[in-house]
Image: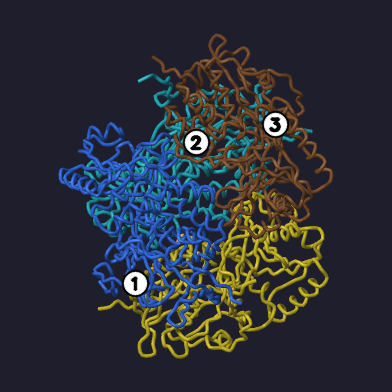
Chain colours: A brown, B cyan, C blue, D yellow
């Protein structure tokens, strides 16, 4: 008799791993398939900000989803530490969104207004107040929006903790398992093919981030997930330069355990190239110096990059395929994959259990929504 | 006007890079496409033996090909050093195929007879003679076949030197460029698709080793390239433990520059898993100790693995597609990719120039040959 | 006016860092001097066992010290996580000391008797019981002593957490600062010299582990701290192979976060060589296979080594110099540096505050005690 | 009977390793002692320029020494490749010393005049000519001095090749062997002490670069070797950005094998700190962009640093101790260690063979010369 999984999850990044964890925690028999190593792509490269408020300044489904997901982190951190031994490094020391021009100041004050109307905390600090909190900040900063609830986690640790906790709960984790195609039968998905092997399951979840395209295409979804490359680097000091996350216009600084400070991130659309360029480092370095001048004395650690999975309308795909029963997609989380991973895992486990989606706002993420295709790209290469 | 390449080469390992180099050296406009980084797979993992005689003990096309390719290395080493600055580490200090049982001794003496009939040097050394040459060898060795012409190179350096020399000659090298499909037009191949981009060229060469399957399938070739995983490790001493390559039944030892000694290699068929197992290291360690007892005092350096691209009949695919004009395959070199890379590059450049294949023996490598499919695998996964 | 430190701590391993942390936490102005990088030697190499009971089977000052130190870990873990962001990975899932022979079984049952008399938990599990707890253990194990209170931490993380928490509390941490000599004045120590610089302080603590010799000699202490090299390696699995620490006669296995398993450790006396040998790995591998046969399927991660600082009588030096006022030594913790680091830091802070030593048992660690010098070595090198 | 070495060499960098090689090549029994790993400090960090003419613009003993040493490289490269298998990467594609201001232009034209008078090749290229040679150079470059004979090698490879070739010739290489003191007897040096071991030899050569101070002090030499820290980074391209070494006022660019380009180097005097700072990278990056604007598109590889061993008058110490027979020093080569390593090794072998120094110019390097001590530093640390 053929082995049947309750769910086959394609993609071992933070989204796939969270889904595997949440499903395994509800007693389902799942297999997590990763074409290379776990957490090897965007999940490993992310700075780990939980910027639910700082990055989203308008009401809507993404804001809703982000707030719900952020609220899940404290209990999640404890569960994952228990099951996997991994501390996800949750820090909730606030985020300062910096204004250096009057225009930015006005924009941030509108954002504060919005956040308060939405029932969230956010407050304005003058330049003097902000430097009182964070002495390393540059003297010419005009002020900052303080979001006390936005924090951060260690992104690679979170991804691995999901996968290892899932394994501890019985999930089957397979690396170097590259899915070639979906196996379809009478309008349903019943498995996947990996080279010469077929795995059978009653559900398949595509959670491959930037690499979700080919399987989505096979399922008739005109797959507009595309990469936006981002470069980062990190520096080290013994005592931390800053306590809060510092969010400027051209870079952000996220203080990690042991005096590590991550500086991110550049943006290059439609590039699958994961090389870090000297120019990318130069831009971040200049931007970081403007925020925290003393960063030049910090020790260089390393640089890296990753590919954020973006969609044409900037919203992730979350939901079941309308025609192919048993096929789900959870991809395209762009800059919010770490933040949204807990709620995405929870939703996917709900789908599998047949629970009704809790709220209307999820409709915005459905797979067959109409999108302005401006974000997609189709180009031949021309001679110059 | 669309840019046309004379050849699009798919796969940035030692085979693809050699093809790019040889074509660029003949003035062709080529692009080399690699889905990850250059020389990141088997080419980076190989021990680099040029065991034309030691690994092949019967007359036939592979023996012919191997001898021709081995003869190309000395001049190639000089050209690549000049163009890329990279020394490929060519060493020609002979190879000792060790006998520890009488059966092995008899087998090797037959092999020597064969080599001599084939006009090649090969000689038998008694245990005493072999230990006079290599003092570190174990006292219970009965004797060895000495092949003076078999040597070795640094496999990762060779692969990169091909690619960098090709770049110096004007070849376009693109990493992180994963080809999704061939672009066909009226029975010819005219390009490849990489995500949203199409590249056009009058020839496409599939040279992706173990990963050649999907494109070969698209071209109607029932792709029997499959992986045989191999694990290796290396140790370090200040003065070399051995001068010659030592080739035993369960492992080989290849002495590299600066006192590095590579010990290889395990065999696991049909596994795409590139993890090194503790058990794999243990087996090699035990086998190496039997050959060179003092190896236990050497410094541990590191372990790694790679996937050798094998075919059902053990011969590589080398040639043009019978129906799809412009499509070529150079893949499935198994344990002989490093050794065969120069001749493969030369052949591919000949194909592109329309030169008649030099000799009948190449027919054995044609793409549409009949094969016993015992090597291929097709399995579902069953419950235990 | 010259800057005066309350204490100058020489050595940035786990002992020196703990002292810096405890002193800084009591408001002292301290500087921590490390000749290379923090936690670069034994502290980085340790497996992190807190084997207070499992390693010590006789009443005495070391047992006393070990139990007191072990009890400090839970609150310490929380403090260090808060101040440095670093989770020290404290796990308290018990330790199984394995018997495979009747002699070992008898020995362990005596040990259990001793532990109980000493008021500590320890119990005997039959082979069947032990395999019920840990299914991966070999079938021929006769039984095991279970110590529930012995656990482990992440040794590198503990060392860095001490140093970084000290920095957060205002301690001055200096790497690449190699102390050449003590600065003495009228029978007191008043500082240290680092190349062309003199640092002044009212106390100097020598905490350089294996490298404590030269400064101890300058202070007239016949320094019998000597190195015992130890090699380790680690393997990875998705779900942990074992839950408890497994302690055999020829190796131990310590399960770490994320499915990492550390296998340690060889013993080579009087060697400053930190190279890992192939033979060392081979011995550990064989020993580990006898305890947990399935470990051969685990993924190889890496190997490393460190130098344990041993003394002639096996006890650390802890205390003030009898003649040179202001000079303290905290070195020679051998295999127990991680375990004893919290109590050592606390004691050193007590010394600085002039608090009377709490108990007589500390007398055993005084600097001028008589020792059988069998452990020391003085040898010329002779021709063979 | 005690084992006697012909020479004990203290320091396993490029200088000590060259001495070991040259002595072993002349049949002497030598031991090379290194406190950590071979080539672990400045020798590993150097960019490897052989800038005999480009860095030295006045007649004198250093110029003489540099020219003689540069001339040794071609034959040396072949010998080391043969004995160790290591290619030292010798490239002789010239060096361009760039002028961007009229003042620099005048200075370089004087330098050219000097070089010609000294019988050396050097020529002036206009901006247009220089960009014809090197298309990647910035358009605003006024011109450059071209030195055709100055080239470069791979510094880490050269250092290791010396040591490994020495080992192949029978030299005893010991790592993790930290010399504490010289062993003196009746006005002669007869050995060294390493912890509890004494090694005896008829000659001792101090070749520890920046770390030569303590042994020189023990020998009564007022040791003014001090460190000047330098930071570097490297970038990668497939085809090289430049062919020649590009030498500007604030940085230099050295093109290495395989498209690697080293950018160096900052200067920080009297610092033993080997950390790379973000600010150091920023300065080099800005300077490199001014010379080769397209460098911003190159791939970041890594950053590192090393400590150049400087002396008060900028000249190395090379010679025998005037009173202590058998003691030699070869240290303080500052930025010229790689360049001067062949001649230094040759000289040291001459000393050991009692050959008269060839030329008067060596007198400038004698150990007891008078020096303006401005370079030395003696400072206490004061409160701010």
Which chain contains the residue that carries disc 2? A
Return the residue at label 3.
B197
Q: Are marks 1 and 3 on the same chain?
A: no
Label of residue C266 in the image: none
Could you tell me how far apart the alpha carbons at marks 3 and 2 are, in whole angstroms? 45 Å
Report how far apart the C-alphas of labels 1 and 3 lie in the structure. 70 Å
Q: Residues within 10 Å of mark 3 (few under 14, many from 20)?
A: some
- Name the mark nearer the viewer: 1 or 3: 1
For disc 1, the marked residue is C223
Residue at x 36% of width, y 72% of height: D195
Q: Quadrant of residue A42?
A: top right
Q: Is residue A217 above or below residue C378?
A: above
Element class at badge 3: strand
Which chain is mark 3 on?
A: B
Q: Judge by depth and name the residue closer to the eye, D288 or C356.
A: C356
Q: Which residue is mark 2?
A: A78
Label 1 crowd bin: few (<14), some (14–19), many (20+), radius 10 Å:
many
In this rendering, does residue B326 appear at all? yes
- Is B372 positioned to the left or the right of D128 in the image? left
* Dots 1, 3 in contact, CB < 8 A: no
For the residue pair D194 and B275, the one nearer the viewer reads as D194
Quick one: SS at disc 1? loop
Q: Residue at x 72, y 78 (%)?
A: D116
Q: Is residue D273 left or right of residue A97?
A: left
**Is B305 on the left-hand or right-hand side of B105?**
right
Counting from the top left corner in percent of width and height, residue A317 is at: 65, 24
């Amino acid at each position: 008799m053929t082995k049947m999984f309750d769910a086959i999850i394609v993609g071992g990044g933070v989204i796939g791993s969270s889904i595997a964890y949440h499903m395994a925690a509800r007693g389902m028999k799942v297999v997590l398939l990763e074409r290379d190593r776990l957490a090897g792509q965007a999940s490993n490269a992310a700075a780990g900000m939980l910027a639910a408020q700082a990055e989203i300044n308008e009401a809507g489904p993404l804001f809703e989803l982000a707030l719900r997901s952020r609220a899940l982190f404290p209990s999640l951190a404890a569960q994952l530490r228990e099951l996997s031994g991994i501390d996800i490094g949750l820090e909730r020391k606030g985020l300062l969104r910096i204004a250096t021009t009057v225009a930015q100041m006005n924009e941030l004050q509108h954002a504060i207004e919005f956040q308060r109307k939405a029932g969230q905390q956010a407050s304005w600090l003058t330049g003097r107040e902000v430097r009182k909190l964070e002495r390393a900040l540059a003297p010419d900063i005009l002020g900052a929006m303080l979001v006390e609830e936005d924090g951060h986690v260690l992104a690679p640790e979170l991804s691995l903790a999901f996968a290892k906790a899932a394994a501890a709960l019985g999930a089957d984790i397979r690396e170097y398992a590259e899915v070639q195609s979906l196996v379809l039968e009478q309008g349903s998905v019943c498995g996947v093919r990996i080279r010469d092997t077929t795995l059978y399951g009653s559900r398949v979840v595509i959670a491959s981030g930037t690499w979700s395209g080919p399987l989505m295409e096979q399922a008739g979804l005109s797959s507009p997930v595309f990469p936006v490359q981002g470069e980062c680097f990190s520096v080290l000091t013994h005592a931390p330069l800053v306590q809060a996350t510092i969010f400027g216009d051209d870079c952000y600084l996220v203080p990690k355990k042991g005096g590590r400070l991550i500086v991110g991130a550049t943006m290059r659309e439609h590039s699958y190239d994961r090389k870090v360029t000297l120019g990318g480092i130069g831009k971040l370095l200049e931007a970081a110096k403007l925020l925290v001048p003393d960063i030049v004395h910090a020790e260089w650690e390393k640089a890296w990059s990753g590919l954020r999975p973006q969609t044409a309308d900037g919203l992730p795909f979350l939901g079941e395929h309308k025609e192919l029963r048993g096929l789900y997609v959870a991809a395209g989380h762009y800059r919010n994959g770490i933040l949204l991973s807990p709620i995405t895992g929870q939703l996917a486990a709900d789908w599998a259990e047949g629970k009704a989606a809790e709220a209307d706002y999820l409709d915005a993420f459905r797979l067959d929504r109409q999108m302005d295709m401006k974000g997609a790209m189709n180009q031949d290469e021309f001679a110059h």
